[in-house]
Amino acid sequence: MCGIFGAVSSTHVQDSLIKGLSKLEYRGYDSAGISLITKTKKIKRLRCVGKVKNLKSLVSKSKSSGVCGIAHTRWATHGKPILKNSHPHNSDEVSIVHNGIIENSDDLKIFLKKKKFKFTSDTDSEVIAHLFSYYSKKSSDSISTMKAVAQKLQGSFAIAAICERWPDKLIAACNGSPLLVGAKKGSNFISSDIHALSESTNKYVPLADNEIVEIDSDNYQIYNFTGKKISRKTSSTKKQTKIVSKGEYNHFMQKEIYEQQEIISNAIKHQIGKKGLLPNIFGPNSDKLLLKTKHIHFVACGTSYNAALIAKYWIEEITDIVCTAEIASEYRYRTVNVPSGTLFVAISQSGETADTIYSLKKAKNRNYCSILSICNVPESSITRLSDLVYLTHAGPEISVASTKAFTSQLIALLFMTMVLSRTSKNKAIEQTILKQVKSLPAIIKKTFLLEKEIKKIAKNFKNKKHTLFLGRGVSYPIALEAALKLKEITYIHAEGYAAGELKHGPLALVDKNLPVIGLMPDNNLVNQVLSNLAEVRARQGLVYIFTNKKLSGSKVDKTNVINMPSCGHFVSPLVYVIPMQLLSYFVAIEKKTNIDQPRNLAKSVTVE
Ligand code: M6R
């Protein structure tokens, strides 16, 4: 799971390669590397373990330069994050970078070893370098070489290669892993995403699956894997490059948590008019389409999947529409029934998550009435592939742990629920939700006042090994999200459970060392949640309750009750997730972990 950037220019490219690579670090930060064709037409490779900043200083110390080069930032899949496994991988006269997984790498290794190629890494990617070298000796040009290589590979890949035999050209190919060409007078580029191109050019052409591109400083030409020329016009990106900084905050995660009030206010300002929700906010004619929809298949990963789960609760509560929320890595491989009138909805912050992209591509070949994406990144792979797009406008989310992207997705899904509610017999429900949505910014502001109290509680988690989060109804996905956040940035094992499910097994874990957090908005499920928490307390579990219900009676131990501001039923997930984000953040502070870039993770998961 990696980022690829490449450039060919009439001037030196090493600086633009480093700049492009820095923007791709969200895809992985285990190691980074660069290969250039130098003045003497020889390949010079520089690699290092860790982040792009380490590579930057290596490149400037080495004073290496060239007009044609490739660069890579890695998230380890095959082989440890050590120097020998860092990209680029070299073979005779060849250097390559790769994103994806080569499924038949073991077979190819056997073939290549017989041809006397020596392997120096544990990666699947190295086979590509040797294959390219092997076929380059048999071909007269770079296109037929790449064509021969691509035809041997099984799995998903985006590849960029340079070769001393064709020192002024860069050759790239992709299948199942995104790659774009960036075009400018006197320079051309390739990149894993549009964002990394933004410093170099605003003109881009996406490659489709099974395509090859050859670029030099003046031209680029796309081919398919059979060698046929493909002509495709460049598009212009509207995206402005904005430097994102932490400002007054200590971490991006902290900043992003606090941005949520403004993001929600902006969503309300932009999507709600005097008479209520503006028409067709999900794209041209989307209201009509939504009102005809009989089923919705939500597909997403991680935090975005938790948002999908909440949408299912909301929509099924007030309409007859049947919703499923499914993890993309499951959806993509299973047999899916698509009844007529089904809408496919992909939810993704980055728009580059491989499993979600594959699921969306699968959905495009089924009889869905439309493919809608809810996404934070304009012009990302997912938005480009969708029929309808809702942009969440949360701004760049830098912290690996997703916070503001989640609440901005929830607001979008609540807007969708409002449109769908027009099919309900309860004609007042849209207004009820609208009123609650409008009240949100002020409630969120009040929720932030809990910071001090949460900071204090966080100290109690520092030495804990496990934590349970419990919720019912719409609070159950918030329990899942709270557990995901805690695991991700504090490395404490955490589980989210439907509170009623506890007694079916997990109750066995409860003892005096296990913190159990109950999420209990004041709704029709309070008594059930209280009973579940009483079961925990009876086994000496350490119960914390987040609630806006005024608690009284013998079932309640008021010592660890965190009083939440009151809020409407529909908006409670957006309110209750905030103290959970803050709790994880402050526990991570206590544990001194790398909050914005937790170990083993990447912001965007671009391999399956
Ligand atoms: O960019 P996406 O929303 O598609 O990403 C999905 C997940 O990888 C992501 O939400 C992940 O679970 C977060 N790091 C959680 O905080």
Image (spheres, grey):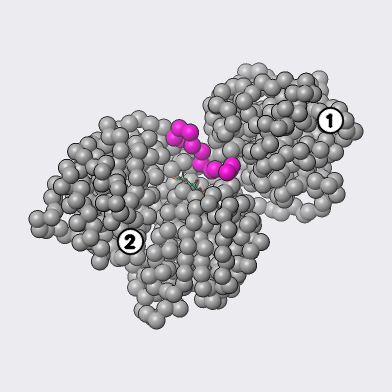
- Which residue lies most toward the left here? 554
Question: Most prominent secondary structure in the magenta stretch?
Answer: loop
Q: Position of residue 180 (x, y in %)?
A: 70, 46
Measure the C-alpha gap from mark 1 to mark 2. Answer: 60 Å
Mark carried by residue 4: none
Picture residue at 43% right of the left edge, 54% below the top: 306
Residue corresponding to mark 2 = 473
Q: Amino acid at mark 1?
A: Ser
| Viewport quadrant of the C terminus | top right
Mark carried by residue 136: 1
Per the rendered image, the range of residues in magenta is: 597-608
Mark 1–mark 2 CB contact (< 8 Å): no
Quadrant assignment, res 596: top left
Q: Secondary structure at mark 2?
A: loop
Number of marks in picture: 2
Q: Secondary structure at mark 1?
A: helix
Q: Position of residue 287 (x, y in %)?
A: 53, 74
Determine if residue 597 is in view. yes
Q: Position of residue 79 (x, y in %)?
A: 58, 28
Picture residue at 59% right of the left edge, 47% below the top: 354
Query: In front here: 361 or 348?
Result: 361
Near mark 1 (Cα within 10 A), the count class, few <14, some 14-19 or many ≥20, is: many
Q: Amino acid at mark 2?
A: Gly
Near mark 2 (Cα within 10 A), the count class, few <14, some 14-19 or many ≥20, is: some
Picture residue at 29% right of the left edge, 46% below the top: 506
